Image (spheres, rainbow, N blue to C red):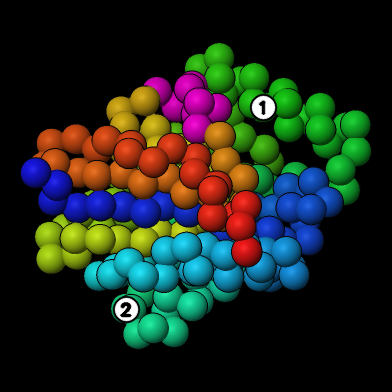
Amino acid sequence: MVLKTLYIVRHGQTDLNKQGIVQGRGMDTDLNDEGRKQAEQFFKAYGYLHFDKIYISMLKRTQQSIQPFIDKGIPFEKLSGLDELAWGVQEGQPSTPETKAAYLSIMRKWTSGDLDAKFEGGESPLEVQARQREAMAHIMSKPEEKNVLICMHGRAMRMLLCLLTDTPLTKMENFPHQNLVLYKLTFDGEKFTIVDFNNSIHLQYF
């Protein structure tokens, strides 16, 4: 029996996404034209669904991505636990060989098990998952909310999917994503099951 269904999406494209520039918790950017189109495409595909509640991060790009659902009158709540990982000194830096090398270096640390590693001024995967546990405890404490839409961020979404599926954080790369891609999970009272994995079909039609 399904007690709760989560529709988890990443926010739509921003200019920094397009430019390959890291934007984390400290960059409160807007969607660009492509991101707004993606938001429209997602609503066109899933606007017929009845969501009991919407949860978004504190960053405006998540709200902009699902604003059409909010405009329908669906209640929403902002949770800091859904914020993107803070990349610290890496945030907003131009995409250069040096910044790419630094990014790949910390990815290797994480996948090899150093989950306390972080950039100066940033967060580690373990720190992100700690606040995600709090956010999920809040979301799961509402049994009356059967169908839930969550809009969040790419790296944080990988970590949340690890948390929900009991996957080690070292395997976070197992959960690919792009802007406004969908992961759908059901909860049977004991465990979450992914029933829609990295679904982007809604972005292929308009």
Give the residue pinned by disc 1. Answer: 106
156 relative position to 144: left or right:
right
183 relative position to 100: left or right:
left
CA distance separating discs 2 and 1: 38 Å
Query: If you read the primary sequence from the N terminus, does the residue marked by circle 2 or circle 1 appear first?
Result: 2
Question: Residue 203, percent across and down?
Answer: 60, 54
Q: Quadrant of residue 49?
A: bottom left
Question: Residue 57, percent across and down?
Answer: 47, 63
Closer-to-camera residue (122/135): 135
Quadrant location, the C terminus: bottom right
Question: Residue 130, percent across and down?
Answer: 37, 43
- Name which residue type carries label 2: Pro
Q: Residue furthest top?
A: 112
Question: Residue 28, percent across and down?
Answer: 65, 67
Inspect this view and state whether residue 174 appears.
Answer: yes
Q: Is residue 47 magenta?
A: no
* Point 90% across, 31% down: residue: 97
